[in-house]
Amino acid sequence: MKLMNPIFTIVLLSFSGSSIAAGNETNQSFSKAKKNLERSVYQDHRETIYCAATFDSKKNVAAPTGFKTEKHKKRANRIEWEHVVPAENFGRTFSEWRSGNEKCVNSKGKSFKGRKCAEKMNTEYRYMQADMHNLFPAIGAVNAMRSNYNFTMLPAVKSEFGSCDMKIDNRKAEPPVNSRGRIARTYMYMDQTYSRYSMSKQQRQLMNAWDKMYPVSAWECERSKRIKRVQGNANLLVDGRCG
């Protein structure tokens, strides 16, 4: 029997270890993911990602001084769980999202597609949608205004939210400085974890820059650990920078 070259063995092992990291494989329920985050991750760190607003166990928001919004005022008093990488960005890779499915028919016999159909019919989509590493608390009005817009720099734009420096213009968004590192490492996590999702070249350059400019905080490290305990996997990009 011919022995394998030891150098080749090392190379082979290194390639096998560089496969896509495991993502969420334990929970398919978006509703359950939100409850787990509230009860087991944010229970003693109730602060929203964009505006650093505090909230209580009943989702009521205490907006920071100077916060304002002219739109979605009813949602300004509640927190919502925001997909930092919008669900549409990976959802549209599923045929059920784009084209529907013969089983995606409502009670009136009308066919539907998009998020509801993907959630109903595709297990892989449900796991991605419920991945807690991609879910952050946000003031409902800010979540609504951000929508599914990509992040970029908007130097000439003024925030519509008063003291919260979240800028939104022409279907683009620029987040406040204190959230950029977390956003970057979330985008990078989704890109490296799920083959369904891939950042554009422009988005990748921005996220790489933010990752370098805005280091991990103690809370970001703790958050990843807590999610791992509940969901079963860590954000390795975060953990690798926690020391």
Image (cartoon, rainbow, N blue to C red):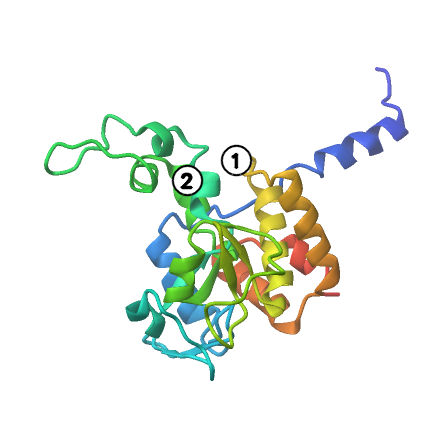
Kindly give the residue lying farthest to the front in the view shown. 156
Going by the image, does 101 lie left or right of 196?
left
Secondary structure of the residue carrying tag 2 is helix
Q: Earlier in the sequence, mark 1 or mark 2?
A: 2
* Residue type at numbered disc 2: Tyr
Q: Is residue 59 visible?
A: no
Residue under the image location 35 percent in, 58 percent down: 32
97 to 225, vertically: above or below: above
149 to 59, vertically: above or below: above
* Residue type at numbered disc 1: Arg
Locate residue 20: give its quadrant: top right
Kindly give the residue lying farthest to the top in the view shown. 1
The 10 Å Cα crowd at callout 2, few under 14, some 14 to 19, many 20 or more, is many
* Residue 125: mark in rendering: 2
Kindly give the residue lying farthest to the bottom in the view shown. 65
As measured in the structure, the alpha-carbon distance from the residue carrying label 1 to the one carrying label 2 is: 9 Å
Q: Residue tagged by mark 1?
A: 196
Residue 183 pos. (x, y %) = 59, 58
Residue closer to the observer: 10 or 75? 75
101 to 181, vertically: above or below: above
How many labels were placed on the picture? Answer: 2
The 10 Å Cα crowd at callout 1, few under 14, some 14 to 19, many 20 or more, is some
